[in-house]
Amino acid sequence: QVQLVESGGGLVQAGGSLRLSCAASGSHLSISFMGWDRQAPGNQRELVASISTGGSTDYADSVKGRFTISRDNAKNTVYLQMNNLKVEDTAVYYCNARALSIGGKWYNYWGPGTQVTVSS
């Protein structure tokens, strides 16, 4: 079982920046991909960014050039630096991780979410 705890959300004006953090803890053998999803009211949840253990990254087209994902493997922590925020970035952001259990199976986990609100 893996627990994910996000932090860093809040209210910011358009054009501003925020940095989200997510720390994974619990019993597991290893964590492969970590990333961030988001869901705005009335919209489906969408992938924002993901990063592999080796540092390969993937971004949604809507955030490329503005958001940067990184991770600290020693701390099982993933970060999302969000710059030049837009009103349409307003959403609940969820951390996710794919972890290998002690029993030898891979599972996907999500955190409870952190609210990001961008005002005009």
Image (cartoon, grey):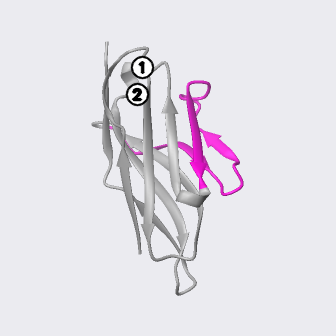
Horizontal and vertical percent for residue 99?
54, 69
Q: Nearer the viewer, residue 55 or 40?
A: 55
Q: Residue furthest bottom?
A: 103
On residue 110, the disc is none
Q: Nearer the viewer, residue 28 or 95?
A: 28
User: Residue 67 lies in magenta, yes or no?
Assistant: yes
Image point (45%, 61%), residue name? 24
Q: Nearer the viewer, residue 41 or 13?
A: 13
Q: Amino acid at mark 2?
A: Asp
Q: Cβ–Cβ below 8 Å for labels 2 and 1? A: yes
Image quarter for residue 110? bottom left
Magenta span covers which residues?
43-72
How would you rate the neighbour count of disc 2 (Cα within 10 Å): few for under 14, some for 14-19, many for 20 or more? many
Q: Amino acid at mark 1?
A: Lys
The residue singled out by tag 2 in the image is 89
Image quarter for residue 16? top left
Element type where label 2 sits in the image: helix
User: Residue 19 lies in magenta, yes or no?
Assistant: no
